[in-house]
Image (spheres, rainbow, N blue to C red):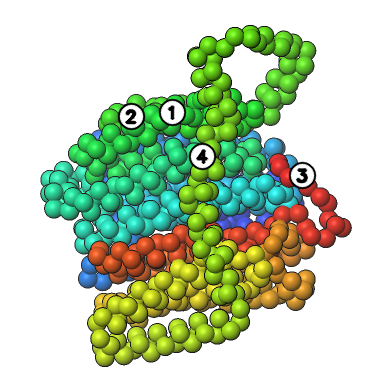
């Protein structure tokens, strides 16, 4: 029966690949493929679930495909099925089917009709892989697809400023969550010395012994999991991205940020619950986070002027309560709560345009001004203060910007001398010296070897930060990003005797191909438009849609999306960083945190936004 799990994953994937064939004008065929694929998948889950229940609902664990294997590292696809998987899979199938059916008419005659349904199906593939995942690697594959489809659907109205800006904000925080998951994987490899599966978490004796032996390492792993879950579910203090993600079409907002994607933080906590349930401090931490989020989000939702923002913060508040329920071990209640919240928010978002019209009509004909008194008590002053604070959304967006992104940009701005051609030639020369040192590493003194090890990693991080802050030339920024990744590989390979040539090829091959393709696209744009500056959004997707698509694929391949060998290479890179190499870990983590934001920023500024030529229609800033 476990072998049937792979077919439940394949159905949405086949539907997505088939949907790519049709042209944008064939609306009926495009929507029919999406609706039939999701409907067929729903029926398949129902048949599988009935058979599973007849067999007394055993917990299923299936090791599907091994990507890479060596002494202590094995990267493989693993599928897992239990009650939690069943609830999330059925919920996802029903809601995605309803939203696809609604979108068939809602998106009628939209310029990006095909693009919307393609992205919707890709999202459903990622969601299915996530909820059926049996280990962290498989979960991370689906997690990555959810992140990139979020970016594409928020920026769906790609001729407008705010959707693109908010898409970059959202994917920035998503990337922070991705890095936290990667760090949890990294420490997990060093403590378990194997690819741990969720099935093994259910073995209480093994988990208890593991926690006793690696207590502080487990604290690190669980902390990273909690941060990743909090970001995905927009919990405090990462709540501000969710209302900004509502810039996409209403139907995508309903399925992503009202029902499915935003609840996956709850799924991650439920899936890893056996691992951290015996640590009381983490249970208290999760409950405190959930309680603070519920209170703050409720206060914000009550004073917002836009219906989507009200629904977003209301959903965040309910998810905060789910965090508390999961921490208390009330998983059945949490699943019921999750289903109710998902259906309610989906319905509210789908009807929000109509409800907004009714409310405006009612306010126009039935308006009664509020009576204000001259005397103010302490309670009213406190209420007014909370009102102003909530209107500003407790400055969560500004706080995240000042604490995380502004320092990285400031460092990048101090490194603008790296943009010069001479600096690039020097960097290439230093890299070649590093390659020579790699081949003769046995003749290098250990202390010097260690210094070179950290030096190359630091250079790689600084190159990415410089590209991140670049506002002058997209080609120079792209070259710096490419160089940074090869410095990164060299830094980890240089000191590590276990890091072989094959492992370097896994990562470098995907990066090198994507680098050449991306450079070709940028050179073509420069040839046609004479400039590739990053000082504004240029909207070249209007006139060069195929070039924009190819460059986007190159960007996704460059950052190690699961369809490239560099995805495996990233896991191998981190697994070869030893536990005591804190500086190397920090430099590498910052490198991979910024790289996706940097490459997508290049894509957004060169190809998205209002076109620089006034002959094209001018869109409103917001959707």
Which residue is under mark 1? 294
Helix, strand or loop status at disc 2: helix
Q: Residue at x 55, y 29 (%)?
A: 390
Residue 448 found in image quarter: bottom left
- Marked residue nearer the N-terminal end (1 or 2): 1
Q: Is residue 363 visible?
A: yes
**Secondary structure of the residue carrying numbered label 1:** helix
| Residue under the image location 43 percent in, 76 percent down | 487
Q: Which quadrant of the view contains residue 345?
A: top right
Mark 4, residue position: 396
Q: Which residue is mark 2?
A: 325
Disc sitting over residue 620 in the figure: 3
Q: Is residue 486 above or below residue 579?
A: below
Q: Position of residue 547 (x, y in %)?
A: 69, 68
Front residue of 55 and 508? 508
**N-terminal label among 2 and 3:** 2
Q: Is residue 147 left or right of residue 525?
A: left
Residue plotted at (34% across, 47% down): 225
Q: Is residue 163 left or right of residue 6?
A: right
Q: Position of residue 427 (x, y in %)?
A: 50, 82
Q: Earlier in the sequence, mark 3 or mark 4?
A: 4
For disc 1, the neighbor class at 10 Å (few under 14, some 14 to 19, many from 20) is many
Question: Crowdedness of circle 2 by 10 Å Cα count: few (<14), some, many (20+)?
Answer: many
In the rendered image, the residue lying farthest to the right is: 615
* Secondary structure category for the residue under label 4: helix
Could you tell me how far apart the alpha carbons at marks 2 and 3 are, in whole angstroms? Answer: 42 Å
Q: Is residue 127 above or below residue 547?
A: above
Percent position of residue 10, x then y: 45, 54
């Amino acid at each position: 029966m476990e072998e049937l799990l792979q077919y439940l994953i394949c159905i949405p994937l086949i539907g997505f690949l088939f949907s790519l064939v049709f042209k944008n004008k064939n609306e009926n065929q495009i929507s029919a493929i999406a609706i039939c694929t999701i409907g067929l998948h729903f029926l398949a889950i129902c048949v599988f679930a009935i058979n599973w229940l007849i067999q007394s609902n055993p917990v299923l664990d299936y090791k599907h495909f091994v990507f890479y294997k060596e002494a202590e590292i094995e990267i493989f696809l693993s599928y897992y099925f239990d009650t939690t998987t069943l609830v999330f899979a059925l919920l996802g199938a029903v809601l995605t089917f309803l939203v696809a059916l609604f979108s068939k008419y809602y998106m009628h005659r939209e310029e990006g009709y095909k693009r919307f349904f393609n992205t919707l199906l890709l999202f459903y593939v990622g969601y299915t892989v996530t909820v059926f995942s049996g280990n962290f690697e498989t979960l991370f594959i689906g997690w990555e697809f959810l992140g990139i489809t979020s970016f594409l659907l928020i920026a769906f109205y790609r001729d407008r400023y705010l959707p693109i800006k908010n898409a970059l904000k959202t994917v920035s925080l998503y990337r922070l969550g991705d890095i936290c998951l990667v760090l949890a994987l990294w420490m997990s490899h060093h403590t378990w010395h194997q690819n741990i599966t969720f099935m093994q978490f259910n073995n209480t004796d093994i988990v208890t012994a593991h926690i006793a032996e690696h207590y502080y390492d487990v604290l690190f792993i669980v902390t990273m999991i909690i941060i990743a879950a909090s970001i995905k579910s927009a919990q405090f203090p990462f709540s501000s991205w969710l209302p900004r993600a509502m810039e996409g079409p209403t139907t995508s907002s309903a399925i992503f940020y009202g029902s499915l994607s935003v609840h996956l933080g709850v799924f991650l906590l439920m899936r890893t619950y056996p691992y951290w349930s015996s640590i009381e401090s983490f249970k208290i931490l999760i409950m405190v986070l959930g309680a603070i989020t519920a209170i703050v989000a409720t206060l914000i939702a009550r004073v917002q002027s836009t219906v989507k923002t009200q629904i977003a913060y209301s959903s965040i508040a309910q998810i905060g309560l789910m965090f508390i329920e999961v921490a208390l071990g009330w998983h059945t209640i949490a699943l019921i709560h999750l289903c109710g919240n998902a259906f309610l928010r989906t319905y509210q978002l789908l009807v929000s345009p109509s409800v907004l019209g009714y409310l405006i009509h009612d306010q126009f004909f039935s308006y009664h001004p509020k009576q204000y008194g001259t005397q103010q008590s302490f309670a009213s002053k406190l209420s007014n203060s909370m009102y102003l604070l909530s209107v500003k959304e407790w400055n969560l967006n500004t706080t995240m910007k000042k604490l995380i992104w502004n320092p990285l940009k400031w460092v990048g701005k101090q490194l603008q001398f790296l943009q010069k051609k001479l600096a690039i030639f020097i960097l290439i020369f230093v890299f070649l010296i590093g390659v020579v040192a790699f081949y003769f590493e046995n003749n290098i003194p250990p202390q010097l070897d260690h210094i070179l090890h950290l030096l190359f990693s630091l250079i790689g991080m600084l190159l990415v930060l410089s590209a991140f802050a670049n506002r002058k030339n997209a080609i120079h920024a792209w070259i710096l990003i490419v160089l940074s990744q090869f410095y990164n590989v060299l830094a980890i390979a240089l000191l590590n005797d276990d890091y072989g040539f094959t492992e370097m090829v896994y990562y470098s091959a995907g990066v090198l191909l994507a680098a050449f393709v991306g450079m070709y696209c940028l050179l073509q744009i420069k040839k046609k438009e004479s400039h590739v500056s990053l000082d504004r959004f240029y909207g070249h997707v209007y006139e060069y849609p195929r070039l924009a698509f190819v460059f986007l694929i190159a960007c996704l391949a460059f950052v190690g999306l699961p369809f490239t060998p560099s995805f495996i290479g990233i896991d191998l890179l981190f697994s070869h960083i030893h536990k005591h190499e804190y500086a190397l870990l920090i430099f590498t983590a910052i490198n991979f945190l910024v790289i996706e934001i940097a490459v997508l920023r290049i894509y957004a500024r060169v190809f998205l936004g209002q076109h620089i030529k006034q002959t094209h229609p001018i869109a409103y800033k917001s959707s």
